[in-house]
Amino acid sequence: MDSRLLSRRDIDFMLYDWLDAEALARRPRFADHSRETFDAAIDSAEQIATDLFAPHNKLSDQQEPQFDGEHVSVIPAVRRALDAFSAAGFMAAGQDYALGGMQLPLTVEKAITAYFTAANMATSSYAFLTIGNANTLLKCGSAEQVERFVRPMLEGRWFGTMCLSEPQAGSSLSDICTRAEPDDDSGHQFRLTGNKMWISAGEHEMAENIVHLVLAKIPGQDGKLVPGVKGISLFIVPKFLENGERNDIALAGLNHKMGNRGTTNCLLNFGEGKYRPGGRPGAVGYLVGRAGQGLMHMFHMMNEARIGVGLCAAVLGYTGYLHALDYARERPQGRDPAAKDPASPQLPIIAHTDVRRMLLAQKAYVEGALGLCLYSARLVDDEHTGDSAEVRQRAGRLLEFLTPITKSWPSQWCLEANSLAIQVHGGYGYTREYNVEQFYRDNRLNQIHEGTHGIHGLDLLGRKAIIHDGALLATMAEEIRATVGAARASEERQLVCHANALGAAWRRVEEVTQALYAAGDLNKTLANATVYLEAVGHVVVAWIWLQQAMAAVAKLPEEDNFRRGKLQACRYFYKWELPKVQPQLDLLANLDTTTLDMQDAWF
């Protein structure tokens, strides 16, 4: 039976037939690679994910990490899986050879990531948070910090986290109040006091050390914290210091979420005095980069994490779809509407039109979302290793525009795919004996991981659409128009029709964006930013689908069932999904203030 984690045929199609990942091997950084090495790495990831990550996914959900007041216990299978992940070199898959890495393109690395996340989101989180932490320090840390903290993480001996939110601040990072007081005259060592909330992988005993990246504020000469984001700095705060002494980081308690239960999620107290390293209060931390640049440094990790969250949502939707597809082909129930004989054999439920509707919707959502995430990863590769400054700049602009969509669209619509997967299973889908209910619970967290829809709507409409005199929006428009033009030249009539629909939808997006800013009132402009995010996201995914359909027509045999499936899913998206955008754009163009005008007292 084919894997129910992901479709390898689809991964290969997206990487090679559409995104031309093989061309990356012609660039100096990836010159040692070829499709063969890419495939070997993906094969290894699929095998380890299947053998060691997937089998304990349900068990780690049922047997959550436990805290006895002193120690956190996690089921042993988690550590075994992570050890195999590290031993295979995946913790350093994208890093330089000098760091023990494979120097794989991010496009391929994300295909690898997809398998582990589809197999077990909770266990994968420990690894991918560590990778994001290491990448941040490689960009922003000193050579000494890289040697001291990054190498052990890339070897899989130490794990990493990011500590941003606080109980009183949530997503409003400008309101954090964790303090960092100078600990010596070097300007690099500090003592931190404060609380950090929702810290995934924040405490466990599966690694020799845990490296926390912590946002905190250095007080001014008057002893007060600077309001806003300008006073935020970034610090390395390890669980254990170089001399083996326990740092003053105490676990106040574990949070128990509806999904992703196998990952410890923590409230951490920094500097509460429980451990007192060196006999003095405060958790020892080391400044990363320059003071006051913490949020800028952390955005390296946050932006990477946003693409990662979108990918996680996409593959949880994808594996749910494959489980539903397999169930629909095996489950007999009901008969053809025209069949009159109740004694005639029952049909597999995939024969019923409404079940095919639900499966086709899932296919359109998850393959569109996975395509969007892998396309975004390809942009990262182009931004870092493109053949010219123009190529690199263009990729950077597209990536900046697409990042809030890449995070948010899969988080919304692949959760809907999980909901449909439950429904395809009928009553069984709502029981814990079947995997699809856990996929839904796990995926529901991705709508809040790395920012809500509202936050990313404000980012897309309030920043990305207008910064650099609208250059990001203009670059996106050029890409969409190029795809529309190419599709219109196709002999495939269906693609021509899709191209015309996409072209009209994008023109409307541009008109509405102009109308929103012509209002002259920022509150009105941004009042319905979430609707803008959803509408533009749908148009972008329609564009992704048209590109996939064009690649299928160009690269695959006409009678190929895989090709036909791609074209039918694209057709579904253009017939059923893209038309949803028009009412949303009309609402935006009318500058509707229904929600803006609502008052607290009226609820």
Image (cartoon, rainbow, N blue to C red):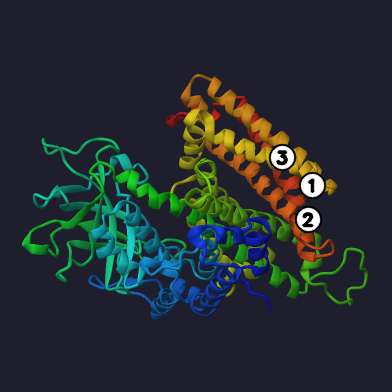
* Amino acid residing under circle 2: Val
- Residue indicated by mark 1: 495
Quadrant for residue 538, please give it.
Answer: top right
Horizontally, residue 532 falls left or right of residue 174, namely right
Residue 553 in view (yes/no)? yes
Ranked by sequence position, the earlier of labels 1 and 2 is: 1
Q: Nearer the viewer, mark 1 or mark 2?
A: 2
Per the model, the C-alpha gap separating discs 3 and 2 is 18 Å
The residue lying at 49 percent from left, 64 percent from top is: 104
Q: Are marks 1 and 3 in contact (CB under 8 Å)?
A: no
For the residue pair 130 and 591, the one nearer the viewer reads as 130
**Above-or-below relation of 505 to 451:** above
Residue 223 coordinates in the image, percent (x, y) = 12, 39
Q: Which mark is residue 553?
A: 2
Report x, y in % for residue 168: 29, 45
Which residue is depicted at the point 73% across and 58% down?
360
Please indicate, yes or no, whether residue 528 appears anywhere in the rendered image.
no
Question: Is the residue 109 above or below the residue 375 in the image?
Answer: below
